[in-house]
Image (cartoon, rainbow, N blue to C red):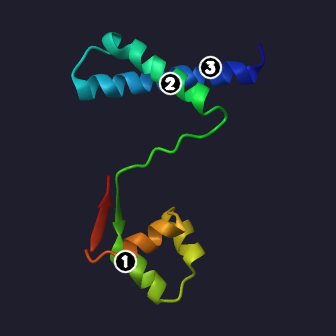
Amino acid sequence: MSRHTVKRKARINELTEELTIGAALRLRRDSDDIHDVVRAVVDYLIEEYPAQELYIPSSVTYPVEELRAALASGKSVRAICKEYRIHRTTLYRVVGEESECVSFP
């Protein structure tokens, strides 16, 4: 067995454990009760989306006024996106909002 296979299995097991703990806390269940379900979900994702990264968006509050000021000052969109670690479409969506800070779940 190659070291990459061992690392991959370790990452999958770590992901399964992390998801089990998170689900158990949210569902107020014992993690042993839901571990098999979480493992089935992880196995399904591996089968359906092999060799792909899974994008999981985070709940983020964007500093809209800072983004608008950066755009107004002539800073490039690429530089702003790199600095705030956001995608170009997210930048345009956020600065188009009226509120001072925008949260996305």
Residue 104 found in image quarter = bottom left
Tell me: residue 39, above or below residue 63. Answer: above
Label whose residue precedes the other's in the sequence (1 or 3): 3
- Residue at left offset 25%, top offset 74%: 99
Q: What's under tag 1, amino acid-wise?
A: Gly
Residue 9: which numbered mark, if any? 3
Q: Are marks 1 and 2 in contact (CB under 8 Å)?
A: no
Q: Residues within 10 Å of mark 3 (few under 14, many from 20)?
A: few
Instruction: Estimate the x, y position of residue 82 in percent, counting from the top left.
Output: 56, 67
Instruction: Estimate the x, y position of residue 88 in percent, counting from the top left.
Output: 53, 69
Secondary structure category for the residue under label 2: helix
Q: Nearer the viewer, mark 1 or mark 3?
A: 1
For label 2, the residue is 42
Judge left or right: residue 32 versus residue 6: left
Q: Residues within 10 Å of mark 1 (few under 14, many from 20)?
A: few
Q: What's under tag 3, amino acid-wise?
A: Lys
Q: What's under tag 2, amino acid-wise?
A: Val
Give the Cα separation between the discs numbered 1 and 3: 43 Å
Label whose residue precedes the other's in the sequence (2 or 3): 3
Q: Are marks 2 and 3 in contact (CB under 8 Å)?
A: no
Secondary structure category for the residue under label 3: helix
Looking at the figure, which quarter contains the N terminus?
top right
Label whose residue precedes the other's in the sequence (1 or 2): 2
Q: Residue furthest right?
A: 2
Residue 96: which numbered mark, if any? 1
Instruction: Estimate the x, y position of residue 97 in percent, counting from the top left.
Output: 32, 74
Residue 61 found in image quarter = bottom left
Number of numbered discs: 3
- Residue at left offset 58%, top offset 27%: 46
Judge left or right: residue 22 versus residue 92: left
